Image: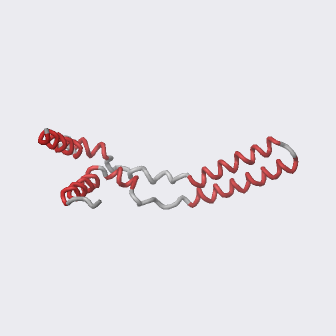
Amino acid sequence: MPLSEHEQRLLEEMERNLYHNDADFVAKVGGRRGRPAYRSIVLGILVIVVGIAALLTGVLTQLAIVGIVGFVLMFVGVMVAIAPSRSVGEPPAGQPTSKARASHGAGQAGFMDRLNERWDKRQDGEH
């Protein structure tokens, strides 16, 4: 079922306000991703290889503790390899966050406040 023209306009207005008012959220959720952390990936793969070697050594020598340590090393290696880089979600130094921007525009009605007012007007008009 297609959206009516009014609904399309409201959706476009909501998107514009989202991009304008909450740039930090858009940056985190949006398709833009930071550069992959190649060092973390390589380090994770090396730890995984060491873990596999320790696991095999534990199996061959029948020492359970060595096998468990190998498995833990493999798990840690995977976690290191897939961990996001630390600079992806952090704003650059000196750049204000959305909370700081919101405090500057506190005199203006927020997007959600305007939506709630519209909703209340619609509800009052129907009853």
Which is nearer the eye, 84 or 43? 84
Please say whether residue 108 is visible from this viewpoint: no
Query: Which residue is found at the position 60% from the left and 51% from the top?
Result: 80
Residue 45, image quadrant: bottom right
Please say whether residue 13 is visible from this viewpoint: yes
- Please state if 23 lies on the left or on the right of 117 as rendered: right
- Please state if 59 lies on the left or on the right of 16 as rendered: right
Which is nearer the eye, 52 or 97? 52
Residue 21 position within the rendered picture, expressed as x and y whole percent measured from the top left: 26, 50
Query: Which residue is found at the position 83% from the left and 51% from the top?
Result: 57
Circle count: 0
Query: Which residue is found at the position 17% from the left and 44% from the top?
Result: 118
Residue 13 position within the rendered picture, expressed as x and y whole percent measured from the top left: 22, 55
**What quarter of the picture does the N terminus occupy?**
bottom left
Which is nearer the eye, 35 or 9? 9
Residue 9, image quadrant: bottom left
Q: Say if 33 sits above or below 21 in the image.
A: below
Query: Which residue is found at the position 72% from the left and 56% from the top?
Result: 49
Q: Say if 42 sits above or below 58 in the image.
A: below
Q: Say if 18 sits above or below 35 in the image.
A: above
Q: How is the image coloured?
A: secondary structure
Residue 5 position within the rendered picture, expressed as x and y whole percent measured from the top left: 19, 60
- Quick one: which residue is furthest to the right in this view? 61
**What quarter of the picture does the C terminus occupy?**
top left
Residue 56 position within the rendered picture, expressed as x and y whole percent measured from the top left: 81, 52
- Please state if 125 lies on the left or on the right of 86 as rendered: left
- Please state if 57 lies on the left or on the right of 17 as rendered: right
